[in-house]
Image (cartoon, rainbow, N blue to C red):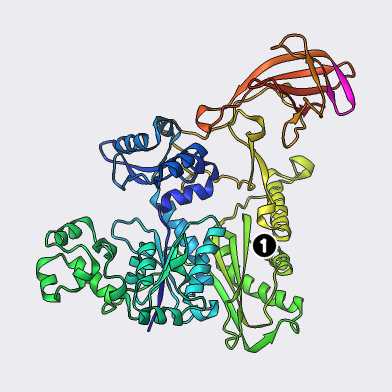
Amino acid sequence: MPRFLTIWLPRWPVQRRLLARPELRRVPVFVCRREPRGAMTVVSWAWAEPPPDERRKRVVSGRSGRVAIPSGMSLAEAMAVLAVAHGSRACHVAEVEPDDPVADRESLERLARWCRRFSPTVGLEEAADGATECLHLDVTGTAGFFGGEESLARTVVWTLASRGVHARVAIADTPAAAWSAAHHTDAVARLLHQASPLVVRRAMEGSSHGVRLASQRHRRWAVVPRGEAATLLADLPVVALRIDTATASAIAEVGIDTIGGALAIPARSLASRFPPLLCRRLAEFRGTVAEPVVPPGGEALPQEAHSFDFPVRTADLDEQQLLGLIESLLGRCLAPLVARGEGVLALQLRLEQAARVAAAPTVIDVGLFRPTASRSHLVELVRLRLGRQRLPAEIDGVAVEVIAAGAVSCRQRLLFGGGVGGLESSDADAEVAMLLDRLAGRLGRGAVCEPQAVGDAQPEHAWIAAPPTRPRQPATRDGGRAPRDRVSRSGARGYAVPRPVPAGRRPIWMPPRPVPLDGLEGEVMAVAPDGPPVRFRLGDVLHRVAQAHGPERIETAWWRGPTVRRDYYVVETDSGERFWLFRRLRDGGWFLHGMFA
């Protein structure tokens, strides 16, 4: 009997934006569509990380904090609902993003290719309204490699979570049944816990860990036993059959609101009284009508594989031989990309283990900061990743697949090199990108970052460690689209940038945290209570202030919880040293926050 795994990505338009800009997790985010008459309607929304006081209020009041803002509601009504639930301050900090279904689809296609580590057959949900949020995987013969179906579902959830993607997963006999279970994992876990011992025993046959799902607090996955979809999912609402609003209203008029009630209606009555969509969905749910797994659309990205005649022990396989085989596969993958002016942006290497071992393939992901068509550079990155990976004892084959590709800039070199160090700007960017790729391959992608300034008044929070930015591609005449700017709630376009500060007002060195100058660390003396210091002790050294410039008042926003209020001074001592000190207005404590050259 075939088995299918469905990955549901709730609120995917918002999730995609949170992955690209993590700072949006702290504010409500609305993805809206502009209607022909100018009104803005909500496509999706989420508030990933509410303020601490909001979370504390929910715990005390016992509320779940979920705000009912369905898709299709006008932005004005959504703001009113948000203000009632969280106060007007939440509306002031809310971010409104324009809907971009093309970018949502493209990012979902890249994720589908990445999920081929779990099954070679991965497809996208073909939704009638175009709002695709699900992936379907045929796991008929691959679940055993991961220790059972329940172990596979758990592995998919937490592997995606490690990449910052929230997903709910379910396995069933048909894609329609898996879709229904993935959208109601909590209810399926509860029903499975209350099911008969026979159903529980059948569920345990496909899992090496039993039905532990029912006792978990966060039920993100569910496994429907073989042949029990109609029985176990009978109490789910009828909308879990993927029917539209008109069909759901038509069947609700006769008092049917569950899948079990719809399955009990004779097929002749269904065809004569209800729209054809309901009959087709029920047939797909039962499995009488096949629902094909549609692979990602667009131009297919290349992939190559090599299978050995018999299992090969990795201990007997020389590193140069393995890299030579991988280089050959990479060369065949690069040939069609180079022909259309593209390069590799993300690569996946799979080492297929021996069939008798029944273990999942070893997957190595290689991500680049800039598309490249250099085979030697890609082989070097693979070599660095292989050195950090524990290889299986035996392998049956090697597969290389391009997950993402991008246009490679190509221009004629200047006769006399210009720029810094004799390199052109484009050459310098390429060299820096290759250096970042090698550092990420050796140290890990999370260890390579760059400081990025953010618009925050509190100095220690005015920067974040962000991944190195890629050069933005401008719009081209051949249909290339430039990235859309963010739209704020007031309608203004552009990104929030910090206000420029004169160079002499900020130090070149700042400690991770402000160093207190009161108590054991030192002492501060000021002539006036609200005036600058005249001397302070830092460690064993007593510094006398010759000149002081300030104060510069810095206060944090009121929606961030406890307000931070400080008066900063740039002081110069009699020895010629310059320090950045501030007095905390709450209690008058003095702190060192930086040193100048």
Q: Is residue 382 above or below residue 209?
A: above
Instruction: Give the magenta part as a residue range.
Output: 537-544
Q: Quadrant of residue 87?
A: top left
The residue pinned by badge 1 equals 374
Residue 65 as seen in the image, left or right of residue 464:
left
**Secondary structure category for the residue under label 1:** loop
Residue found 70% across the figure and 66% down from its top: 385
Residue 280 seen in render: yes
Residue found 41% across the figure and 81% down from its top: 201
The total of numbered circles placed on residues is 1
Amino acid at the residue labelled 1: Ser
- Asked whether 387 falls inside the magenta stretch, the response is no
Residue found 44% across the figure and 42% down from its top: 60
Residue 372 seen in render: no
Question: Residue 542 or 122: which is nearer the viewer?
Answer: 542
The image shows residue 232 at horizontal and vertical percentages of 31, 73
The image shows residue 574 at horizontal and vertical percentages of 88, 16
The quadrant of the rendering that contains the C terminus is top right
